[in-house]
Image (cartoon, rainbow, N blue to C red):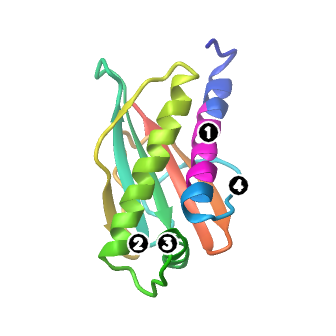
Amino acid sequence: VLFRSMTDKVKATIKCFVEAVINVLGTMAMVQVKPGQAYLKKDDKAKGYITGVIGMSSPSGKARGTMSITFTEQSALGIVSNMLGEQFTEINQDVIDAVGEMTNMICGQARKNLVEIGMQFDGAIPSVVTGKDHSISHVSSKAILAIPFTTQFGNLTVEVCFS
């Protein structure tokens, strides 16, 4: 796939992740997700309470990336309750595990989409970070792309970074 400009490649990359979030959360948790305007993030502060983070690397090992998905406490509890069919009122191990699983599924779907635009990545094992004002470590501190989403349960933000 040839891109006319870097902007086209960025737009195509955003589209890969937006489609993955809509597809996975719609299918797995019956949640309607609305993407907002993507922006470049300037710091490592999470925009929520619980974050799933997963690393990616190209088969050659030359290119690396990270994807994170951060939920507010409310959005995590609502989405996981829908996904698992039971009511969660606090962040516990089941919710943490479900966030890790959603991170894995969204990243897997996005990686399939990325192949179609000429970017091939393998995924690592996700980790989950919780707590107010936690930080997210990406492979690079420059050019962290953030995509905000709204759901009936609250907000979530996907961040993507490649080096």
The region drawn magenta spans: 13-24
Disc number lying in front (4 or 3): 3
Q: Earlier in the sequence, mark 4 or mark 3?
A: 4
Q: Earlier in the sequence, mark 3 or mark 2?
A: 3
Residue at the location (45% across, 63% down)? 46
Judged from the image, the secondary structure of the residue bearing numbered disc 1 is helix
* Residue 157 image position (x, y, % from top left): 55, 58
Q: Residue furthest front?
A: 85
* Residue 16 forms part of the magenta stretch: yes
In the foreground, 101 or 6: 101
Q: Residue furthest bottom?
A: 89
Q: Amino acid at mark 3?
A: Ala
Neighbor class of circle 4 (other Cα within 10 Å; few <14, some 14-19, many 20+) is few
Q: Amino acid at mark 4?
A: Gly
Q: CA distance from mark 4 to mark 3?
A: 18 Å
Q: Quadrant of residue 99?
A: bottom left
Q: CA distance from mark 1 to mark 3?
A: 22 Å
In the foreground, 125 or 30: 30
Q: Quadrant of residue 31?
A: bottom right
According to the image, label 2 marks what residue? 133
Q: Which mark is residue 76?
A: 3
Judged from the image, the secondary structure of the residue bearing numbered disc 2 is loop
